[in-house]
């Protein structure tokens, strides 16, 4: 879709709310208890208020366009559980009222693991995209967000806020009568507490117990999710650390977090994490340990998205012989993108040595560093020596 088409669609969607035939709202949700409860409340409220309406479930503009053609003269509810960037931009440009129901992030991961049998780390990767997308939705000017941890999440409070957002002052029905009708069909908001007991979660009715995260899996999930929770705070997410469990190595069988034997042909040693990052300037720091690497060969580090289709940053350096090191790459994301990964690649074969990934951290540079990131060359890489006390000391590069 070109800019002209986007403007035209936005103009057609953004009709006066007093015109019932052209009323349009959106509801963004996840498949968790609280979020689905919110979706069903919105559907119930619109049915009582509007009567017949057109429900369009879509992820992008193509899906919206397909449903839009069949709407007739009916008002429209746009629903999406995985809105793409283009759809969010359109909803924002058209100033469409968006109801966004945000559940506790851990519940999304539970749902992926226990309802769909998704392995823990894959569930975590996938859910970072939901977190990032929903955080963008909440930031839309016309968004009305509801969070499971808000102080007042009673059915009556949510119903009143939803109806007030779509209410037509010229309506022939009484506001309080509509509120009462919605509440008569709406159960209380789900308030199931988060369960730290893995067995209790896995044995819930309807749960798929094929996937049991280990204690270490639970630690990784908790630490990463805690970083992504900041997306919903005013200052946003400023850093996240991805542990080695989220990365793949060149070991046979796609092993993770193992010592990588460097002996062998040129190849990608490490790749991952395939998690989402919000738009902005970022610095990626990769910490690793190397032992007995005597070849003195250059390695290439890069940051790519689209599973390698677009390169965001790249650097070359000589792999040290022994020690704990950290290299960094600066890059800019204009929007969250799929297939986000950093890779470490051996450019030549090696005769011996062992490498082990320790962690990967993405941080937002301060204002001065952001200017440097914007002017950095494509082949700019920095390598540091990480001391035992955790401090970082610049070490001279043998090669860039």
Image: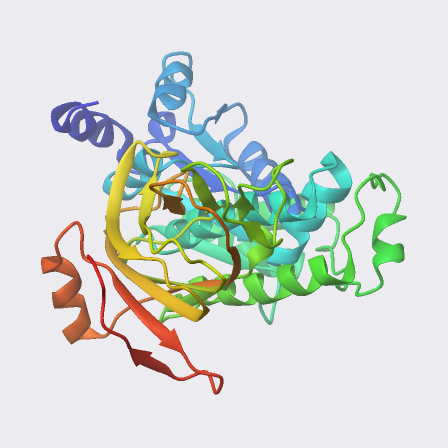
Pick the front one: 116 or 176 = 116
* Of residues 252 and 370, the one drawn nearer to the viewer in this rendering: 252
Q: Quadrant of the C terminus?
A: bottom left
Rendered location of residue 351, percent (x, y): 47, 47
* Nearest to the observer: residue 341 or residue 91: 341
User: Which residue lies at the image location 38% right of the left edge and 28% below the top edge?
Assistant: 60
Q: Residue furthest bottom?
A: 389
Q: Where in the figure is residue 391, as x and y percent of width and height?
A: 40, 84
Q: Quadrant of residue 267?
A: top left
Residue at 36% x, 34% y: name it. 306
Residue 149 in the image: above or below residue 256:
below
What colouring method underlies this structural image? rainbow
Query: In this orientation, does residue 113 appear?
Result: yes
On the picture, is 304 further left or further right than 210? left
Work out whether residue 180 can be spotted: no
Residue 193 at what x, y percent from top left?
76, 64
**Count of marks placed on residues:** 0
Is residue 354 left or right of 235 when viewed as pictured? right
Q: Quadrant of the N terminus?
A: top left
């Amino acid at each position: 879709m070109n800019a002209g088409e986007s403007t035209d669609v936005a103009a057609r969607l953004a009709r006066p709310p007093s015109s019932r035939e052209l009323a349009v709202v959106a509801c963004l949700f996840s498949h968790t208890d609280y979020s689905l409860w919110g979706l069903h409340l919105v559907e119930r409220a619109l049915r009582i208020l509007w009567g017949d309406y057109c429900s369009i479930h879509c992820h992008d503009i193509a899906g919206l366009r397909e449903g839009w053609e069949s709407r007739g003269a009916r008002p429209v509810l746009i629903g999406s559980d995985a809105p793409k960037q283009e759809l969010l931009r359109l909803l924002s440009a058209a100033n469409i009222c968006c109801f966004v129901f945000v559940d506790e992030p851990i519940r999304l991961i539970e749902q992926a693991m226990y309802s769909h049998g998704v392995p823990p780390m894959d569930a975590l990767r996938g859910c970072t995209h939901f977190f990032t997308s929903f955080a963008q939705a909440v930031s839309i000017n016309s968004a009305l967000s509801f969070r499971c941890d808000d102080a007042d999440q009673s059915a009556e409070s949510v119903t009143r806020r939803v109806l007030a957002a779509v209410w037509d002052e010229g309506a022939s029905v009484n506001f309080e009568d509509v509120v009462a009708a919605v509440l008569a069909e709406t159960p209380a908001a789900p308030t199931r507490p988060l369960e730290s007991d893995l067995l209790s979660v896995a044995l819930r009715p309807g749960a798929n117990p094929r996937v049991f995260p280990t204690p270490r899996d639970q630690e990784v999930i908790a630490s990463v999710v805690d970083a992504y929770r900041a997306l919903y705070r005013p200052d946003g997410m400023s850093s996240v650390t991805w542990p080695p469990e989220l990365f793949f190595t060149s070991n046979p069988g796609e092993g993770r977090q193992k010592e990588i034997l460097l002996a062998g042909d040129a190849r990608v040693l490490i790749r991952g994490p395939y998690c989402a990052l919000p738009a902005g300037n970022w610095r990626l720091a990769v910490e690793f340990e190397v032992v007995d690497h005597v070849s003195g060969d250059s390695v290439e580090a890069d940051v790519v998205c689209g599973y390698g289709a677009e390169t965001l940053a790249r650097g070359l350096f000589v792999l040290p012989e022994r020690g704990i090191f950290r290299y960094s790459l600066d890059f800019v994301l204009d929007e969250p993108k799929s297939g986000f990964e950093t890779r470490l690649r051996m450019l030549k074969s090696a005769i011996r040595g062992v490498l082990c990934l320790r962690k990967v951290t993405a941080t937002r540079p301060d204002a001065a560093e952001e200017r440097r990131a914007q002017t950095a060359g494509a082949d700019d890489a920095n390598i540091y020596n990480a001391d035992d006390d955790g401090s970082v000391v610049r070490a001279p590069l043998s090669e860039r």
